[in-house]
Image (tube, rainbow, N blue to C red):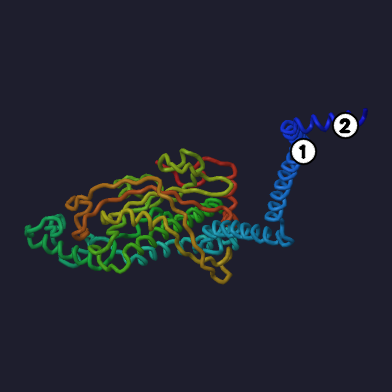
């Protein structure tokens, strides 16, 4: 029986071989596919994890902090600190300027009134040196002309060779005056006289009226001198190499003012104006775009300047006026070895350009050459770094600044 069943099974298998074999293969494939798919999924996940770990390792290797990294960071910080300190030192050095007297600030080292008379003398000598440094002369005065030409009619007008080509002198006297004036133009690179500097007469007929008033006059006179010195240095650079006004860039210094700034006002200056600290928006000569005023860091004063200059050199002059300049610092008591410092304290806040009528009375005796010239009138601010000079600022000035008192109390009045 069993043998019969086996034979039947064999017969069935042989008979259906073509069907059974593919079915068997399919079953086996299905059985193999399920674990293979599962294994491949696990491998893919594992590979992704390994790639992520690899990237993290590479990133860590690239950003790994060296054992000496802190030294590099400290060096970088030290460089920045040195830069900051250098900037602070340079700012402070701008206001560590040379003094007219080392016996006055911040307090007189003597009790005698004579110490103020000595300052007065130093101030007047300094003014004389300003015009001497520029090698400047003014146009011939009536007295000088009469001394050279005798008792002639000074009111006689004369031929302007540079202004009226081909004209002839009307009289012999006018020709003499012309020659004398023209000769003066060849003797100086720039027309100027001490009266061009506001404050030139502030110590004339001075009388002592108390230490506070004397100290204020000394301090503001010192500020005025610093401003004037920078202007003179600027003109000297512009006119370097020139011995005649006809060849110079800056032909004439009309004036420096600490109050009114129009051209006519320069002629009306009584020589008594001194700088005024700008403590609010109304304290300056004009509304100004910088908005700078005295605070805990800086002190600010305004001044105006008028020059006759070659039309082509206006921008060059402005740039030079605002450029860096050298000075020597001898210590607050003048007893140290001089150190060369630099300062750059001027900013132009307004400018105006006007034509020059060479035949009008204002310019009648001045020869400017054949260059096209203009009258340049500019308003400037002068900035003092308080760290540089507060140590020598008189108590009477410092107290006034701290109280932010009215301008009339801490400097000259404005009209």
**28 or 323, nearer to the observer:** 28
Q: Is residue 219 left or right of residue 148?
A: right
The secondary structure type at the circle numbered 1 is helix
Could you tell me residue 358's position as x and y percent?
Answer: 19, 53
Do tag 2 and tag 1 residues touch (Cβ < 8 Å)?
no
Say which residue appears at 27% left-offset and 59% top-offset.
251
In the rendered image, which residue does mark 2 sit on?
6
- For the N terminus, the quadrant is top right
Say which residue appears at 72% left-offset and 52% top-offset.
57
The 10 Å Cα crowd at callout 1, few under 14, some 14 to 19, many 20 or more, is few
Say which residue appears at 45% left-offset and 46% top-offset.
412
Of pointers 2 and 1, the one earlier in the residue sequence: 2
Could you tell me residue 93's position as x and y percent?
Answer: 54, 60
* Mark number, residue 250: none
The secondary structure type at the circle numbered 2 is helix
**326 or 4, nearer to the observer:** 4
* Mark number, residue 32: 1
User: Quadrant of the rendered structure where residue 230 is?
Assistant: bottom left
Q: Is residue 393 left or right of residue 181?
A: right
Farthest residue in the bottom direction? Answer: 337
Residue 10, relative to residue 213: is it above or below?
Answer: above
User: Quadrant of the rendered structure where residue 234 is?
Assistant: bottom left
């Amino acid at each position: 029986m069993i043998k019969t069943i086996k034979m039947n099974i064999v017969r069935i298998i042989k008979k259906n071989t073509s069907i059974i074999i593919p079915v068997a293969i399919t079953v086996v494939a299905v059985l193999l596919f399920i674990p293979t798919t599962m294994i491949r999924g696990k491998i893919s996940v594992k590979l992704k994890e390994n790639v992520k770990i690899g990237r993290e390792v590479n990133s860590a290797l690239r950003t790994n902090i060296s054992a000496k990294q802190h030294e590099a960071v400290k060096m970088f910080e030290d460089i920045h600190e040195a830069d900051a300190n250098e900037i602070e030192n340079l700012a402070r050095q701008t206001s560590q300027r040379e003094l007219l007297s080392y016996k006055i600030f911040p307090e007189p080292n003597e009790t005698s009134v004579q110490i103020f008379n000595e300052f007065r003398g130093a101030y007047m000598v300094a003014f004389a040196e300003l015009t001497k440094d520029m090698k400047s002369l003014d146009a011939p005065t009536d007295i000088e002309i009469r001394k050279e030409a005798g008792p002639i009619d000074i009111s006689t007008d004369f031929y302007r060779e540079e202004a009226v080509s081909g004209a002839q002198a009307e009289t012999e006297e006018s020709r003499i005056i012309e020659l004398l004036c023209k000769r003066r133009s060849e003797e100086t690179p720039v027309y100027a006289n001490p009266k061009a500097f506001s404050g030139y007469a502030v110590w004339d007929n001075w009388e002592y009226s108390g230490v506070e008033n004397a100290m204020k006059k000394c301090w503001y006179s010192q500020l005025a001198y610093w401003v004037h010195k920078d202007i003179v240095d600027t003109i000297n650079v512009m006119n370097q190499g020139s011995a005649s006004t006809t060849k110079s860039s800056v032909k004439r210094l009309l004036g420096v003012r600490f109050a009114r700034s129009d051209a006519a006002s320069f002629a009306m200056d009584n020589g008594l104006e001194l700088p005024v600290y700008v403590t609010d928006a109304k304290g300056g000569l004009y509304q100004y775009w910088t908005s700078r005023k005295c605070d805990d860091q800086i002190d600010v004063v305004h001044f105006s300047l008028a020059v006759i200059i070659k039309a082509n050199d206006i921008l060059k002059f402005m740039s030079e006026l605002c450029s860096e300049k050298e000075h020597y610092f001898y210590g607050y008591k003048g007893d140290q070895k001089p150190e060369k410092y630099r300062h750059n304290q001027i900013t132009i806040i307004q400018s105006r350009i006007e034509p020059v009528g060479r035949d009008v009375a204002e310019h009648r005796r001045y020869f400017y050459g054949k260059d096209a010239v203009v009258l340049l009138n500019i308003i400037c601010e002068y900035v003092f770094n308080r760290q540089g000079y507060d140590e020598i600022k008189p108590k009477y000035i410092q107290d006034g600044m701290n109280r932010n008192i009215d301008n009339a109390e801490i400097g000259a009045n404005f009209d």
